[in-house]
Image (tube, grey):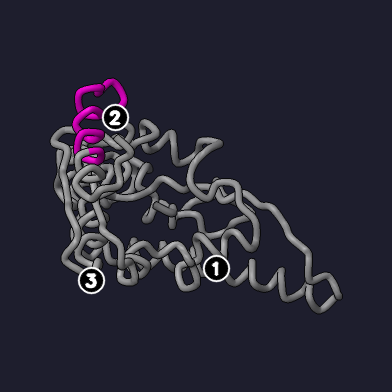
Amino acid sequence: WLDPSITDEARPFERDPKLNLYDPANPAQPPYDSAFLAAYRAAQVARNRRITDWARGELDAARRRGQPWFEHCFVVQGTMADPAWLDPAIEPSDRKPRWCYMGEPHMVNDAPAGLARFTTLRSWLSQYAYDLSNADGVRSARSVSVPVCIIENSADDGCLPHHGRELFEAVAHADRERHVISGATHYYFDQPDKLGEALDAACGWLARKGFSSD
């Protein structure tokens, strides 16, 4: 979701118009072609790596000056810029176009809240660094040996279809289940029936596995 149009972290409002999804002057508009998406994804990774290099450099400098405990908080601007929120042809699902789980994506991209918006040097490296993150669900799923139940929402405006599919496929044993709640959004806002369906799926699985206390 990182906004690659931000090429200088110190000047986050000066953005590359060719990579700014929300700039109406950008010649690339939905539906996006494969060349634009490839360039966009590469630019996202490049920005992530620039932040990572800076964070590692700050920690290395602190160690050299005898402050191994040093930590620093910082803000990451532009963290809701996935083309899939604007182009429903990217991983088609029942999600609402031009929307995400926090609202209108353009607004959320510059809002004072969001994933990785407020972070620290070590937190960035552990959670969000493309090459170093420990938050790799697919990699972790390969080592899970206990029963697994994955519940997906077909109109999820926070997770795309590949998330649940890749997690399910990564589980290396057969004691796994996958349930899709048709029409459900990420947080089930104003969807008590969908929330109930998800709870029934979860509780039913727990009971079948003998994990229920009832």
Characterize the local packing of mark 3: few (<14), some (14-19) or many (20 or more) Cα atoms within 10 angstroms.
Answer: few
On residue 188, the disc is 2
Residue 48 x %, y %: 49, 64
> Nearer the observer, disc 1 or disc 2?
2
**Residue with the mark numbered 1:** 50
Question: Does residue 65 sit above or below 24 in this rendering?
Answer: below
**What secondary structure is the magenta-colored segment mainly?**
helix
Looking at the image, is mark 3 or mark 2 earlier in the sequence? 3
In this picture, which residue range is highlighted in magenta?
Answer: 189-203
**Above or below: residue 82 compared with residue 54:** above
Identified by mark 3, the residue type is Ala
Q: Residue furthest bottom?
A: 64
Q: Would you say residue 11 sits in the magenta stretch? A: no
Residue 110: percent from left, percent from top: 50, 39
Residue 173 position in % (x across, y down): 20, 69
Of marks 3 and 2, the one in the foreground: 3
Residue at left 28%, top 43%?
A: 85
| Residue in the image at 48% along x and 67% along y | 133
What is the three-letter code of the residue carrying label 2? Tyr
Residue lying farthest right?
66
Q: Nearer the viewer, residue 145 or 191?
A: 145
Q: Is residue 96 visible?
A: no
